[in-house]
Every structure is written in C-alpha cells, then in structure tokens.
Amino acid sequence: MSEERFLFLSRNAAAPVVSRPPADKVVGGDPVFTTWNAEERGSLYCGMWQCTPGKWRIHYDEWEYCRIVEGLSVITEDGGAARIVRAGDSFVIRPGFKGTWEVLETTLKDYVVSV
C-alpha cells in the first residue's frame, strides 16, 4: 500500500499520548499534556497538543511553529513581555527561548517542530 500524501491534522490523526511537565518545572496548577504526533520525518514533527490549566517553565532547544486552535495561554520570555495567545494566533518559538507557559483556559494547538 502506498503512503498517503495528504494528512489532515486532527485528534484522530494519531493515538494520544498523555504526559505532564517535570515536577521541578511546574510553577502552578497541574498542567496535563495530551499530544497527537501525526507525523515524524527525521528531525521534523507535527501534530496537535492540548494542555489543561497550569504554569511551567519552558526552554526551547528546537524551532516550533504553533497555531492556537482553542483556549487561552500566556507565554512569557525571561526578562521579556508576556504574550497572550488565543484561538487563531500563529507564532514561532526559536531555539534558546526560556520562560514560562501558562494555560489559563485549556489550550489546543497545531505544531510543527524542527530539532
């Protein structure tokens, strides 16, 4: 059977994987991640990610494109301004970004990651 050349990103595109940030990175709440990693091509990944309310420290070694599908979050770079992201917002987080991600309303995003 040949590989399909078109893939819709949805929560049905892959089996969900449930996880949490490491306890030493959690700043508040009890954030729970659910990830549907729909595609992996060497160092490129894409899929959907959802998180329940909470706040944790982040440090990106990878490049990531995100589009918020649902919810409301605040991403704050260390020493920088807080950025509110909500449904319809698209952005890139570059390697070296350090700060916090706070989910105020359960957030669902599409992502493409290059490591």
Image: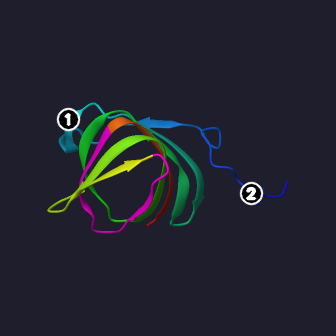
Residue 62, picture quadrant? bottom left
Q: Amino acid at mark 1?
A: Gly
In primary-sequence order, the first of circles 2 and 1 is 2
Q: Is residue 37 magenta?
A: no
Front in this rendered view, residue 33 or 89 = 89
Q: Amino acid at mark 2?
A: Phe
The x, y position of residue 86, in whole percent, is 41, 46
Q: Is residue 94 magenta?
A: yes
Which residue was labeled with disc 1? 28
Query: Which SS class for mark 1?
Result: strand
**Residue extending farthest left:** 79
Whether residue 82 sits left or right of residue 110 in the image: it is left
Assess disc 1: are there few (<14), some (14-19) or many (≥20) residues with their C-alpha within 10 Å of its C-alpha: few
Whether residue 66 sits left or right of residue 22 in the image: it is right
Query: Which SS class for mark 2?
Result: loop
Asked if 25 appears above or below 59 in the picture, the reply is above
Whether residue 31 sits left or right of residue 69 in the image: it is left
Assess disc 2: are there few (<14), some (14-19) or many (≥20) residues with their C-alpha within 10 Å of its C-alpha: few
Measured in 3D between alpha carbons, the distance from the residue under mark 2 to the one under mark 1, in whole angstroms, is 39 Å
Asked if 29 appears above or below 24 in the picture, the reply is above
Instruction: Name the colouring of the figure.
Output: rainbow
Q: Which residues are magenta?
A: 87-103
Q: Quadrant of the N terminus?
A: bottom right
The residue shown at (50%, 66%) is 43
The x, y position of residue 53, in whole percent, is 32, 33
Which residue was labeled with disc 2? 6
Residue 98, picture quadrant? bottom left
